[in-house]
Amino acid sequence: MSNEQPIIVGLDIGTTKIAAIAGRKNEFGKLEILGFGRANSNGVQHGMVLNIDQTIKAIQTALENCYASNPNLEIQEVYVGIAGHHIKSLQTRGDIVRRSTDDEIKQSEIDQLIADQYKTYIPAGDQIIDVIPQEFTVDNFQNIPNPIGYSGVKVGANFHIITGDKNAIRNINRSVEKAGLKVRDLVLQPLASAAAVMCEQDLEAGVAIVDIGGGTTDLAVFYEGILKHTAVIPFGGENITNDIKTGLGVLKTQAEQMKIQFGSALADETKSNAYITIPGLRGLPHKEISVKNLANIIQARMSEILDFVSYHLKQVGLDSRMLNGGLVLTGGGSQLKHLIQLSEYVTGLNARIGYPNEHLAAGHIDELAKPMYSTCIGLILKGYNVYENNTNLLKPGMDEDVDIDEGMREPASFSEAADGTMTVRVPRRKSLKGFMDSIKDGLIDLFKEEEDSRL
């Protein structure tokens, strides 16, 4: 295998911005950023593409900016993040009785177990985005991370199934394809953000990733190395801006600027005698805005978002005593002043800001180390998980009875009929292990300072 790694591109289609980042791993397993472009997003609300034409233009602008940063780039396919309040998740259980009980369990049997979950009943307008194995069982043995090599009569697993609205998925695919790109895979945004800001210790300790974006707040909860829960909360930074605009009677651009420059998530931490002066509209007198009033509005909405986080953690039985890794706050909204203190107060968990810079090679531009780019950097890491797992499958010395093509996870393909109906070809699982094992392995590899001897 050549030492030259492929260039992988992440495309984050957000409510406030669209970002395209091209990256390649160096010999130390760190990401070198080869191109970066962003554009303001106009056609997206609450993480969903509502105006396809405006979204296409924004994607093309982000791409042009990416090419401007590196004219030698050629971008044809991208990993795209998906979010929005239409995203739902459910837990299922699947078992298969094996034909030859004395033989070792092979990857093809795990693939079959996963493929069976795509037949799970979901509402008519929804579509399964991903099926993620949690822990496996073989006969009476439980909590097995990877059952390949075991033997037994029955193999089963608990699964985390992520679903989304068919129309929302179709709009994302149309927008990307009409912008001249191919969707390599759709990745749930909280999982991408988690890959960018988490390390192996976080997985083991138990952690909740809270990605506060423009239109939504994405949540991914990991416990004992397993993805336990995902959720998309339909509030984000845009809601705070709109609250300020309505509550203080200012323009949206002024509200956004005040939030960034003077905003605080804790009213008690602000001075009661501090004021912001903003110009009046069309000859009207200047307006004096109390910094404390501004903080009260921000705190009310942020507390609501964090209450949702607490609710979801209670739903899956992971309260403050269980998640030793606490909350990891990321996304553009995590940069609010005093947000860590408010988060700890509302949820009872330790909190920190998650930056994606630990996976970046030295010399990257400072802009990319901001939490708002966690999803985009995570999409590149997800792409490398797929690439490395496919490469591992092609290595000599593997079990000859395993069908290599069946072990690979190809990108989802979407075709549209003349009557407008969409046909989705469900992809097979990509890795020799389950999804969570691949994320764990990928994260461990990223933290090695020397070249991975397996590559």
Image (cartoon, helix red, strand yellow):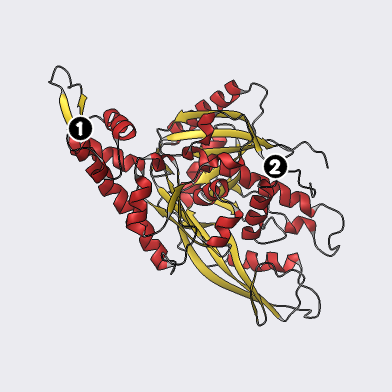
At label 2, which amino acid type do we have?
A: Gly
User: In front here: 331 or 447?
Assistant: 447
Q: Counting residues from the N terminus, which is met first, the one under dot 1 or under dot 2?
A: 2
User: In front here: 296 or 68?
Assistant: 296
Q: Residue at x 37, y 54 (%)?
A: 344
User: Residue 126: image x %, image y %?
Assistant: 47, 57
User: Residue 410: image x %, image y %?
Assistant: 68, 51
User: In front here: 407 or 340?
Assistant: 340
Work out how far the residue at label 1 is from the one at label 2, CA to CA, in angstroms.
48 Å
Q: Quadrant of residue 11?
A: top right
Q: Residue at x 45, y 36 (%)?
A: 52
Location of the N terminus by quadrant is top right
Position of 204 compared to 261: left or right? Answer: right
At label 1, which amino acid type do we have?
A: Ala
Q: Which residue is mark 1?
A: 274
Q: Residue at x 76, y 55 (%)?
A: 405
Dot 1 lies on which element?
loop
Say if 280 sits above or below 447 in the image.
Answer: above
Dot 2 lies on which element?
loop
User: Residue 239: image x %, image y %?
Assistant: 31, 43
Q: Is residue 170 visible?
A: yes
Task: Find the residue positioned furthest to the top.
Answer: 283
Q: Is residue 174 visible?
A: no
User: Residue 373: image x %, image y %?
Assistant: 51, 38
Count of number-bearing discs: 2
Mark on residue 447? Answer: none
Task: Find the residue positioned furthest to the left.
Answer: 285
Near mark 1 (Cα within 10 A), the count class, few <14, some 14-19 or many ≥20, is few
Q: Which residue is mark 2?
A: 29
Position of 146 compared to 211: left or right? Answer: right
User: In front here: 193 or 358?
Assistant: 358
